[in-house]
Structure formats: structure tokens, C-alpha cells
Image: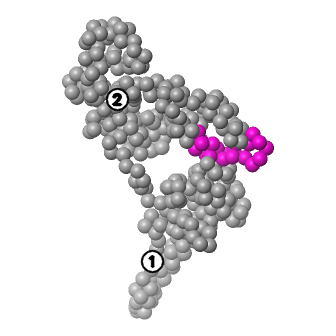
Amino acid sequence: MIDYLHPSGWFTSSIVEVSEDLNVKSSIVEKTLQKLKKLEPLGIFAENLSECLKIQLIDYQYYNEHYEILLKSLHYLPTGKFKQVSKLCNVTEKELFKMIKVIKTLNPKPAEQYQQDNILIDQPDIIVSKSEKGWRIDLNRSTLPSVDLDEDYISEINDYNFDEKGTNFADEKIGEARWLKKAVEQRNKTIVKVTAEIVKKQVGFFRHGLNHMKPMILKDISDAIGMHESTVSRVTNSKLILTEWGVMPLKNFFSASIASSEDSETHAASAVRETIKTLISSEISGKPLSDDKLAGILNKEGMDVARRTVAKYRDMLNIPSSSQRRREARLQNFVSG
């Protein structure tokens, strides 16, 4: 569950999505989430700002029906509608200001204090690095299976004076061990072969980053190396690759294409999503870019993307709409101010 935790400490994924990813019932995810919300720091695993503050207010024994209404009316506070909010909460403005003062002592982002950069949580299976001759591909032997046979012990077994039944049994098991060793070695060679072709076709990414990812499907790799698509799919499934740009699933290199607005080469959908993510992360706080503006910027950069496509990719990235980002920015500034 911690893999679904936002850097702020909020749980922003849907219950259905997590249950499908973990292959468990939604009810189990829900029960687990409720237990996780009782952990420290207070407010961790809350599903939004209001719940995060509510958990803390309950623990500090401040929470009551007035605070309940206030938490539902937080979006009014940055606009200065204190008189309206005080009426909603059925308190005087003086009492409201005291309540707001309490709110400002709470932590809206309980996990922020634990953030560290460049923490490698998952060990990569494949490591790609730059060398003098081009690109070097190494397998992480600590994550991938390997089979080693003790040839001295096998020689002792072969020299032992077994009866016919024992000899047949020993030969059978030694044969199975050698077959397993060969199969694992062949699998690892296939991983290297597939990765080498991915590096060849996605050299722009390895040199410059995710914005330079090209459209690519399984068939592109399978045709190039003379293997079946299902083989490539099995090899890339659940494998992590370490590059200069961090650790990522190997399957992320396969992405649909987006047409170019300049009649040049197409763009990978993953590259478009990364560009959207970068643009939004660098926007001025309180002045978020609308989907229309994002589409306009992308088109100027040669990516023929409609507003609805931007909205779709933004949702896939779990990024709120511009209006919601604007409200959240005002609210965060107000609560933290």
C-alpha cells in the first residue's frame, strides 16, 4: 500500500485501482486503508486535505460539528468569505478565527518531512550505462534467477557404484539440473537481447530523457530480433531497468504514437505525458495551466494533441484539473500561512 502513497502523505489512488493491481477484494483494501490511517504521523494515508486535518483534530480532541462544517467549507477561506463561513459553522467570526488558528497549527502534508531524493526502493533487474563503445547492458544477478552446478559433486555421483535404478535416477536428476541451468541462461540471454534492441530503438531516451521516447510496440522488437511477441512480452513483464534517468519498468518503453503537428516523426504517448507532467510541475503556483493552454504549448512543440487528450493524460497522471489545482494552491497557502 505504501507504493500508492503520494509524497504529501495522502492516499490519492482509487480503491478499485489498488484492488485490481494487488489482485485482492476492494473490501480488503478499504479495511487495510482504515488501519493505516491510524498510523503516525497523524493524517498519513488520508484521502484528501479535509480528512488529513480531520484525523489530526480528532486526535487533539478539537473535532466537533463546527469543525466538521469548516472542513467542508475550506475552499471559501482563501477568498476571505469569513462571514459566510461563520454562518455555515454557526459560530461568531471571532470563534471562527480561533478555529482557523487551530487549523493552521496542523500539518497538511504529514509525509513531507520524510522526503528524500534519489531513494532506490526497488532493485533493477537490468542496468544500462554509457561506455566508450556505446551502451553497456548488465543483468543484476541479485534479482534474476541463476543456477550453479557443483561439477565435482556430479563427478562423485557418476563415479559412485549405484544399482541400475539408482544410476537411472541420478542421470535423470542431473539431466534436469543441466536443462534448468541452460533454460535460465537462455532466458537471461533473451533479456539482454530484447534490452539491446530497446536501447537501439530508444537511443533518444537514453541520451536525453523521457521527453525523447519514441512510439514502439512489442511487434517492433519481436520482428527485429526474430522472436514471438509473447516471448518479448514475458521478458519485459515485471522487469525493472536502471538508466541515467532512474529506475522504470521495462514495459514503459512500449507506448502508442501521437501524430506530429509539423508532419515530422510521431511522438510516444509516454513522452507527451512526461511533457505534460513537466509543464504542470513548473507552472506558477496559483496560476495553473488549463488543458487548452497545455494543448497549445504541446502543439507549438510539434505534438498534435487535442484538449481532451491532455485531460485524459492528466487524469492518468493523477493530476487535478487547473481549477482544482488553483483552489488547492490557495487553500495550501492559507492553511500553511
Q: Residue at x 65, y 33 (%)?
A: 295
> How dense is the environment of label 1, judged by Cα within 10 Å: few (below 14), some, or many (20 and up)?
few
Q: Position of residue 65 (x, y in %)?
A: 28, 14
Q: Secondary structure at mark 1?
A: loop
**Magenta region, residue range:** 256-276
Name above or below for residue 270 compared with residue 69: below
On residue 71, the disc is none
Residue 83 in view: yes
Q: Nearer the viewer, residue 186 or 123?
A: 123
Q: Which residue is mark 1?
A: 148
Q: Position of residue 132 (x, y in %)?
A: 59, 72
Q: Residue at x 59, y 28 (%)?
A: 290
Left or right of 314? Residue 157 is: left
Magenta highlight on residue 280: no
Residue reaching furthest left? Answer: 61
Q: Which residue is mark 2?
A: 336
Given the image, on which type of amino acid does mark 2 rest?
Answer: Ser
Q: Nearer the viewer, residue 326 or 136?
A: 326
> How dense is the environment of label 2, judged by Cα within 10 Å: few (below 14), some, or many (20 and up)?
some
